Amino acid sequence: MSRVRLENVSKKFGTAIGVDQLNLTIEEGEFFTLLGPSGCGKTTTLRMIAGFYYPTTGRIWFDDRNVTEVPPQKRNTGMVFQNYALFPHMTVSENVAFGLEVAKVPKPEIRERVEEALQQVRLGGYGDRRIAQLSGGQQQRVALARSLVIRPGILLLDEPLSNLDARLRDEMRSEILSLQRSLGITTVYVTHDQTEALSMSDRIAVFNQGTCQQVGTPEEVYNCPRNAFVASFVGETNLFPATVEEVSAEAVRVRSMGKTFQVRHRREEAGFSAKPGDRLFLTLRPEAVDLAREEEEGSTFTANMEWVQFMGTSFHCEARLENGASLKAMFVNRPDWMGRLREGDQVRFRFPEERLQLIPEGETNV
């Protein structure tokens, strides 16, 4: 296992910036996810860790070893590609053994390690099959076994589940995470899928336009986003322009949509300070929105329900507030709510102040 450290790393492709001034530490044995939309720099970062790209500036360390310009085959990393990159003319065992044969490992040891790797990914007895005889999930396991058989210090996975159907993705998420936990191997995982990132990771780095916007545990990234991009990309959220009126040690009073809100805010937790007159965003997750009681006043709004989607375990709704702003809400399915959420109805909502957060209007680079 290894600890990975990227120190002021940038990567340019001509005049285009792929990754800009990235500082990142991935701890030994950690499941660390690089999350973001297409073209944000996450795969470029993974390829620099693997050695397929060299940084334009900056350094990469594995423990105390500078590997910035060390070729891929000398970094002791295992890579699982998005398309698996399996050899169709070879059997499962031959695919898994390929890296060991290149390294000239003795044949008896190759056979032993291949069988061990196939057992680890639950493919014992599949060694003589051709790749074309396997399902997508089984091919993914072969690619994983081929990476594990070389006993890498770091496992790198580049969107390995993107070619699988939804149900198989769910199954493979659990299998990969269980395997990583049992081996204790340092793992760097690239995805654009929020569910994968939130459900599998010890920590997440959220990327956008070549910069790392926030690093934290899944709970920190979801519950305490550092800017509007993170709040919107990692799950759905409501963003309402707000102006700061008054600041105290523990809270900020803001004005938004014609109402005043007292929002808990501490600089060391939020990552930014606020002062009177600042323009910020007031954010509220859809699941935090409440239906207001008839007699309730304060932070309540009347809205017209524009659409309602029944998702089995919950209702997902979008409503139009009186000031024209759109509101997303999500309610857990309960029998007593049957018929209460209908398109076209006028509904009163409450914004619980303890669930409100403030975030800056612009992006914040880590």
Image (cartoon, grey):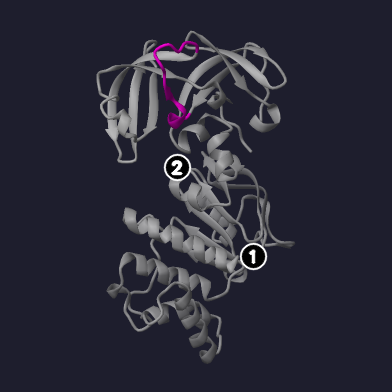
| Spot occupied by residue 323 in the image (x, y as percentages of width and height) | 39, 10
The residue positioned 56% from the left and 81% from the top of the image is: 103
Reply yes or no: does residue 233 show up in magenta.
no
Foreground mark, 2 or 1?
2
Q: On the image, numbered disc 2 is attached to which residue?
A: 37
The residue positioned 47% from the left and 62% from the top of the image is: 176
Q: Nearer the viewer, residue 156 or 253?
A: 253
Q: Which residues are magenta?
A: 285-298
Q: Which mark is residue 70?
A: 1
The amino acid pointed to by label 2 is Pro
Give the quarter of the image for residue 250: top right
| Spot occupied by residue 19 in the image (x, y as percentages of width and height) | 57, 45
**Residue 210 appears in view:** no
Q: Please, is residue 38 above or below residue 255 in the view?
A: below
Reply yes or no: does residue 287 show up in magenta.
yes
The amino acid pointed to by label 1 is Val
Q: Are marks 2 and 1 in contact (CB under 8 Å)?
A: no
The residue positioned 32% from the left and 80% from the top of the image is: 129
**Residue 328 appears in view:** yes
Mark 1 Cα within 10 Å, few/some/many (few <14, many 20+)? some
Q: Outermost residue, right direction?
A: 64
